Image (tube, helix red, strand yellow):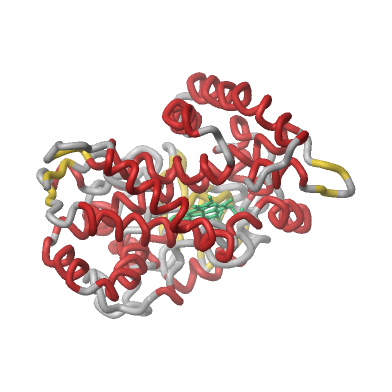
């Protein structure tokens, strides 16, 4: 393909099959292929084998460098923008709240209650944009409640968290929202330092690194990280799940009739339409060679998770959404290696509980405008709208 026809993964939406077709074509040409990112030459890493290797190769693909450009200016310094031992140390401090045991403990009390509350708010209506009413809200509410943010300001807090994620598209708005979050949380942090509760905020203010407590700014930066890494990803995963099940109503009917299929459906969704479709990394500050390709210093390398998850050398008939497939061990959706997503238990349980509640409360859910609901986005990917009736 001539350079002029390369896709720009920072700027194009690649809605619906456009992304998967582009990634399939690239993967069929080879494991490392030229692409564009924000107008700059970049490389797609697109076979399962090459991507699994790249995720574990911190020397050629140091994970923190890209995050220092794409998120640190507004999020602050967190373990996401650290490397090596420092990354491990801070990550251990900030992630115990996401262990499977903790998540299971809050499951019925927290996760199911939030899903029921959002459906209660639909009242007597028979149609809605389900993205606006449900999928775009639930993950933000879960993180807010795990943190221990007062529920009466949850909607305002969500708007700030969404606004802060506008970085780097709208830096001024993003910074303003990050400031609002800071101003709102500072007095709550002071309260938790005085009187700890059983929530993540109290855990973070009590955490010690190198025999000292985390500063307010360190705590705030890690809270911003939870929203940037945990909220929009799970939001898009849930949107993709609802879209995929309703787009072929027999899938929805199968899950209504056979609850035992639901867990597998979620794993298959994470393979078939994963929300972090492509993850931008910067290559090392010196030239490297990877799978026979010379990569110049500090070049964007696009980790094409969505391409690896449909690699026919690993998944039989990868273009088919198969409710009976058992693929979770081979999924690259949570990024294998030292950066493996610490929120994956929470993400999976949120998806499972939300799906159970929606199937129970709105069994007759139907998609009204299929095209409008198609997942879009070449980096983070999900439906902008979900027009449904029931
Ligand atoms: C379906 C939903 C999710 C997907 C697909 C997902 C995917 C990923 C991926 C691919 C990475 C690796 C990034 C890299 O290698 O640079 C990652 C890291 C991370 N995720 Fe998730 N994630 C999800 C949900 C969550 C949730 C719910 C949380 C927490 C509330 C979370 C917190 C994090 C954090 C803190 C990191 C950084 C880990 C590190 O740098 O060591 N994620 N996630």
Horizontal arrangement in the rendering, residue 177 relative to residue 159 (left or right): right
Give me the residue at 27% from left, 36% from top: 121
Q: From the image, which quarter does the N terminus lie in? A: bottom left
Q: Looking at the picture, how far across and down is residue 81, in whole percent?
A: 66, 45
Give me the residue at 29% from left, 75% from top: 260
Picture mark count: 0
Q: Looking at the picture, how far across and down is residue 270, in whole percent?
A: 36, 63
Question: Toward which corner of the image does residue 250 lie, by quadrant?
Answer: bottom left
The image shows residue 238, relative to residue 258, as above or below, that is above
Question: Toward which corner of the image does residue 221 lie, by quadrant?
Answer: top right
Question: Toward which corner of the image does residue 255 lie, by quadrant?
Answer: bottom left
* Extreme-right residue of the structure: 211
Closest to the observer, 45 or 376 = 376
The image shows residue 250, relative to residue 148, as above or below, that is below
Q: Is residue 69 visible?
A: no
Closest to the observer, 330 or 143 = 143
Give me the residue at 70% from left, 47% from top: 203
Q: Is residue 180 visible?
A: yes
Closest to the observer, 234 or 304 = 234
Q: Looking at the picture, how far across and down is residue 380, in whole percent?
A: 39, 47
Closest to the observer, 236 or 95 = 95
Q: Looking at the picture, how far across and down is residue 302, in whole percent?
A: 46, 53
Give me the residue at 34% from left, 55% from top: 354
């Amino acid at each position: 393909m001539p350079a002029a026809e390369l896709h720009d993964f920072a700027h194009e939406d690649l809605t619906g099959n456009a992304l998967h077709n582009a990634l399939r074509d690239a993967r069929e040409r080879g494991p490392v292929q030229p692409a564009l990112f924000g107008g700059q030459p970049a490389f797609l890493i697109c076979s399962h084998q090459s991507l699994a290797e790249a995720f574990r190769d911190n020397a050629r693909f140091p994970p923190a460098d890209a995050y220092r450009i794409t998120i640190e200016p507004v999020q602050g310094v967190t373990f996401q923008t650290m490397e090596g031992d420092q990354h491990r140390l801070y990550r251990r401090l900030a992630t115990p709240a996401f262990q499977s045991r903790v998540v299971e403990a809050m499951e019925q009390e927290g996760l199911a209650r939030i899903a029921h509350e959002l459906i209660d708010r639909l009242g007597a209506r028979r149609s809605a944009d389900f993205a606006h009413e449900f999928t775009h809200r639930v993950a933000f509410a879960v993180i807010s409640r795990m943190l221990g943010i007062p529920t009466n300001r949850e909607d305002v807090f969500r708007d700030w968290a969404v606004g802060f994620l506008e970085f780097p598209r709208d830096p001024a708005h993003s910074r303003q929202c990050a400031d609002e979050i800071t101003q709102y949380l500072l007095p709550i942090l002071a309260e938790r330092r005085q009187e700890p509760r059983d929530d993540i905020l109290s855990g973070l203010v009590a955490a010690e690194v190198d025999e000292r407590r985390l500063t307010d700014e360190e705590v705030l930066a890690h809270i911003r990280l939870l929203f940037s890494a945990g909220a929009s990803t799970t939001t898009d995963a849930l949107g993709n799940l609802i879209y995929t099940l309703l787009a072929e109503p027999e899938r929805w009917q199968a899950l209504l009739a056979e609850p035992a299929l639901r867990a597998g459906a979620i794993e298959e969704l994470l393979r078939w339409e994963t929300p972090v479709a492509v993850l931008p990394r910067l290559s090392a500050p010196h030239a490297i060679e990877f799978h026979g390709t010379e990569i110049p210093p500090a070049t964007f390398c696009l980790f094409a998770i969505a391409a690896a998850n449909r690699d026919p050398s690993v998944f039989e008939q990868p273009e088919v959404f198969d409710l009976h497939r058992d693929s979770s061990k081979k999924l690259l959706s949570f990024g294998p290696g030292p950066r493996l997503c610490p929120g994956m238990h929470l993400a999976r349980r949120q998806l499972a509980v939300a799906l159970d509640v929606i199937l129970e409360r709105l069994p007759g859910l139907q998609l009204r405008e299929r095209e409008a609901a198609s997942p879009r986005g070449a980096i983070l990917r999900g439906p902008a709208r979900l027009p449904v009736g029931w």
